[in-house]
C-alpha cells in the first residue's frame, strides 16, 4: 500500500523533534551534531534567537497580503540585497526551483525585448542541479531527472563541466540566451569551478551578448565566506538565483538582476501568490543583515579553513575511506573511496549529520555560526564514523 506521504524520498529513520544551533534532538533524546543544515538552509543554525524574534514579531503583525499591494518588508529586503550585491532589482520566490524558472524566463525575455527572439537556448553543465520543475529538470537533462516525465522542455544545451573549448564553441551560436551555472556544484558533489574558468565564462558571455546566470541557491548567502560564490572569481553575473540560506529555514528564494538584464520583465510578465510575503521577507532581511556583514563572512572563511584543515587530517587518518576534501568556506565535501552513503549512515550512528551528494561525496554544510568547539567535536564524531566503516570492510 502506498504510504500517506508520496514515497519520492529515501529517508533516514530519524525523526527530529527539536533544533538548537548546530544541534538536532531525535525523538529518542539523542543529540546529533548537524553538519547538513537541512541541505544548506539553516544558515544561522536551528531556532536562531535573532530569527525567532523577528518571526514571532512579524507573525503577530502580518503574514500575507499578496502582491496586489506594496509590501514594506519585501521592499526592505530588496533594498538590502541591492545595497550589498551587483543587483539593481529583486523578485522574491519561495524556493530555488522557482528562482530557476524566473531566471530562465528573464534571460529569454531580455533577448526578446532587445529584438532577438531567436536567442532562447540556455547552456548548462553536467552534474548541475537547479530544481525539479519542468524547466529545471530540462536544465539538468539527466535520465534520472527527466526519465518518464514526458516531452522535455526544449531550450537547454548540456555542456561538459570545465570544458572551456566546448563552451567557447557553443556560446558563439546565435541562438544562445544565457549560461546557467553553479559556481560550486552542490548536489553534483561540491565541484568548485576554478576562478579563471568563471572569469573566462563571463568574458565569453560579454563577447557574444549572452547573459550569465549564477545559481547561488546552495553556494550563496555566505556559505563560501563571500556573500555570493561568484565573488571569489571577481566577476558579477547578470542574474543570480538565491534560496535556501536566505530564509534561514523559512521558505524564501530570490532572483537578483541588473537593470539591463531585467529590462523585459514589465508588469504582468511574472508573479507569485506567496513570493515576497511579509513573514518570509522579514526573516530574510534579518538573515541578510547578519550574513552580509564582512566580519561575519570573514568568520565563515576562518571556520571553513579550520574545518578543512581538520578534515585533511581525517582523510590522512583514514586513507581507505576518504580520497580528499574539496569545497570553499563552509561548503565542503569529503570525496569517499568507500560508498559515501555508508559513511553518511555511519555518521548517523556516531551522532553527526552529513549529506550525500553525487560523485561519491559526503557534503558538510554546517550552520555558518558553528563554533570552534563544535568543529572539533564534529571531527571526533566523523572519525568514529570512518573507523566504523573501516571495521565493517
Ligand atoms: C544549486 C541549486 N539550485 C536549485 C535548487 C532547487 O531549490 P529548491 O529545492 O529550493 O527548489 C537547489 C536545491 O538543492 C540547488 O542546490
Image (cartoon, rainbow, N blue to C red):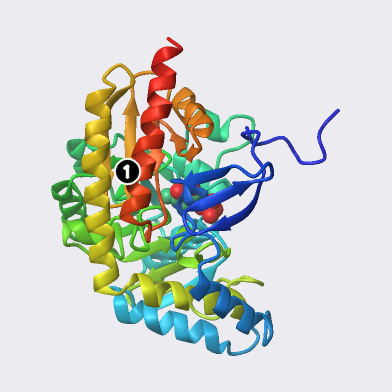
Whole-percent x, y for residue 135 in the image: 53, 49
Residue at figure coordinates x 51%, y 52% from the top left = 23
Q: Relative to the observer, which residue lies in front, 11 or 13? A: 13
Image quadrant where residue 19 sits: bottom right
Whole-percent x, y for residue 180 in the image: 36, 51
As displayed, is residue 343 above or below residue 309? above
Q: Quadrant of the N terminus?
A: top right
Numbered label tally: 1
Q: Relative to the observer, which residue lies in front, 97 or 228? A: 228
As displayed, is residue 351 above or below residue 254? above
Describe the element under mark 1 as helix, strand or loop.
Answer: strand
Q: Is residue 176 at least partly visible in the picture?
A: no
The residue most toward the right is 1
The residue most toward the left is 196
Residue at figure coordinates x 25%, y 40% from the top left = 310
Whole-percent x, y for residue 279 in the image: 61, 77
The residue most toward the top is 393
Whole-percent x, y for residue 308 in the image: 24, 43
Local crowd size for mark 1, using a 10 Å CA cut-off: few (<14), some (14–19), many (≥20): many
Q: Is residue 63 at least partly visible in the picture?
A: yes
As displayed, is residue 167 above or below residue 24? above
Q: Mark 1 vs ligand 1: CB under 8 Å?
A: no
Q: Quadrant of the C terminus?
A: top left
Q: Relative to the observer, which residue lies in front, 335 or 306? A: 306
As displayed, is residue 326 above or below residue 179? above
Image quadrant where residue 291 sits: bottom left
Residue at figure coordinates x 21%, y 41% from the top left = 309
Tag 1 residue: 332
Q: Is residue 363 left or right of residue 226?
A: right
Amino acid at each position: 500500500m502506498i504510504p500517506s506521504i508520496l514515497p519520492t524520498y529515501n529517508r533516514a529513520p530519524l525523526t527530529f523533534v527539536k533544533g538548537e544551533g548546530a544541534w538536532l534532538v531525535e525523538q529518542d533524546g539523542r543529540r546529533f551534531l548537524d553538519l547538513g543544515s537541512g541541505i544548506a538552509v539553516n544558515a544561522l543554525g536551528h531556532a536562531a534567537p535573532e530569527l525567532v524574534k523577528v518571526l514571532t514579531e512579524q507573525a503577530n503583525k502580518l503574514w500575507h497580503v499578496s502582491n496586489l499591494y506594496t509590501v514594506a518588508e519585501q521592499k526592505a529586503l530588496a533594498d538590502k540585497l541591492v545595497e550589498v550585491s551587483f543587483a539593481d532589482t529583486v523578485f522574491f520566490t519561495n524556493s530555488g526551483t522557482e528562482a530557476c524558472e524566473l531566471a530562465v524566463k528573464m534571460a529569454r525575455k531580455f533577448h526578446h525585448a532587445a529584438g532577438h527572439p531567436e536567442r532562447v537556448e540556455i547552456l548548462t553543465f553536467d552534474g548541475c542541479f537547479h530544481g525539479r520543475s519542468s524547466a529545471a529538470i530540462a536544465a539538468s537533462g539527466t535520465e534520472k531527472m527527466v526519465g518518464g516525465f514526458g516531452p522535455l522542455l526544449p531550450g537547454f544545451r548540456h555542456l561538459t563541466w570545465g570544458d572551456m573549448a566546448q563552451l567557447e564553441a557553443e556560446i558563439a551560436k546565435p541562438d544562445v540566451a544565457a549560461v546557467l551555472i553553479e559556481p560550486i556544484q552542490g548536489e553534483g558533489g561540491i565541484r568548485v569551478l576554478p576562478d579563471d574558468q568563471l572569469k573566462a565564462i563571463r568574458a565569453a558571455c560579454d563577447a557574444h551578448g549572452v547573459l550569465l546566470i549564477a545559481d547561488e541557491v546552495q553556494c550563496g548567502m555566505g556559505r563560501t565566506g563571500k556573500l555570493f560564490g561568484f565573488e571569489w572569481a571577481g566577476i558579477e553575473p547578470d542574474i543570480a538565483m538565491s534560496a535556501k540560506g536566505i530564509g534561514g529555514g523559512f521558505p524564501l528564494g530570490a532572483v537578483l538582476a541588473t537593470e539591463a538584464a531585467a529590462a523585459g520583465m514589465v508588469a504582468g510578465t511574472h508573479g507569485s501568490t506567496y513570493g515576497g510575503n511579509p513573514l518570509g521577507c522579514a526573516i530574510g532581511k534579518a538573515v541578510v543583515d547578519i550574513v552580509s556583514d564582512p566580519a561575519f563572512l570573514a568568520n565563515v572563511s576562518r571556520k571553513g579553513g579550520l574545518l578543512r584543515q581538520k578534515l585533511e587530517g581525517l582523510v590522512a587518518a583514514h586513507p581507505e575511506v576518504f580520497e580528499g576534501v574539496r569545497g570553499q568556506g563552509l561548503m565542503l565535501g569529503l570525496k569517499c573511496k568507500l560508498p559515501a552513503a555508508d559513511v553518511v549512515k555511519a555518521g548517523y550512528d556516531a551522532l553527526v549529520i552529513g549529506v550525500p551528494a553525487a560523485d561519491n561525496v559526503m557534503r558538510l554544510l554546517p550552520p555558518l555560526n558553528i563554533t570552534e568547539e563544535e568543529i572539533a567535536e564534529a571531527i571526533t564524531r566523523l572519525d568514529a564514523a570512518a573507523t566504523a566503516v573501516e571495521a565493517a570492510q
